[in-house]
Amino acid sequence: MRICEYFGSIQGEGLMIGIPTYFIRTAGCNLRCDWCDTAYAQDGGIEMTVDEIMEIVDDTENICITGGEPMLQKDIPELLERLLSAGKRIVVETNGSVDISPIPKDERIIVSLDVKCPSSGMSEKNLLSNLMHIGKKDQLKFVIGDQVDLSYAIRFIRENKVDTNVIFSPVGGMDMLPIAEEVVHRKLNVRVLPQLHKIIWGDKRSV
């Protein structure tokens, strides 16, 4: 599979925010979001086998498979099974436009499923059938750039009843005030979260 980079850091977003995590970032993405902060992973990368990836994974318990778009890599299910066999807990971050059904059904895997809002320029790419493959342990993530996005996200969660954790995060990762005020005002059962790694390290690529 095509790998862009791998490194140890802390999880910067979602349910596992703040926890030391080893990241494996795949290369290649089928979307071109207007505000993408990992455009360097859209192409390129190096070819690695599952065995080679397992050799570079350190003893950190928590693993994040991200991209790019991991579900474009045909060996992802095999890699996930190998990581589970090694005793790892895994977050799979996916852009929501590619079928996630090949992800193994295991309580130790959290699926982080994006729903692309209008400011991304990719909202028409959301694959709604993916919603049937996430549950209570997983997370549905909206990256919100403006009031149009916020209204879109609120309407989406009302029209698509999914029993999972919902996360609203601002484009750029830090300006949460407008989102938080709207969530409190509307009494929405969602988490408003930053991108913690950007607060700590700014836009540094990895640590």
Image (cartoon, grey):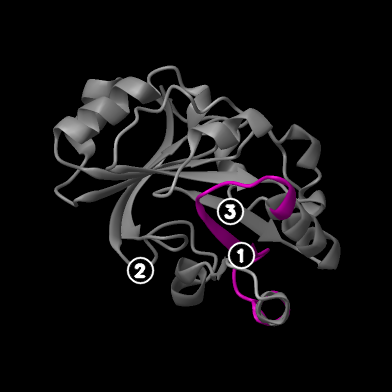
Pointer 1: what residue?
169
Q: Is tag 3's residue or tag 2's residue first in the polypeptide sequence?
A: 2
Identify the residue at image location x=55%, y=65%: 203
SS label for mark 3: strand
The spot of residue 18 in percent (x, y) is 35, 68
Q: Residue at x 52, y 71 (%)?
A: 202
Q: Dot 2: what SS?
A: loop
Tell me the residue that label 2 is attached to.
Answer: 18
- Real-space Cα distance between discs 3 and 2? 17 Å
Residue at the extreme top: 74
Q: Which residues are magenta?
A: 158-179
Seen as rendered, the residue at the extreme right is 148
Instruction: Give yes or no for residue 98 being in the magenta stretch.
Output: no
Where 21 sits versus 109, above or below? below
- On screen, residue 3 versus residue 170, left or right, reads left
Q: Is residue 174 above or below residue 21?
A: below
Q: Are marks 3 and 1 in contact (CB under 8 Å)?
A: yes
Where's the N terminus, which quadrant?
A: top left
**Residue type indicated by callout 1:** Ser
Q: Looking at the rendering, which quadrant does residue 4 occupy?
A: top left
Q: Earlier in the sequence, mark 3 or mark 1?
A: 3
For residue 197, what is the image quadrant?
bottom left
Comparing 89 with 2, the one in front is 89
Residue at numbered disc 3: 141
Q: Earlier in the sequence, mark 2 or mark 1?
A: 2
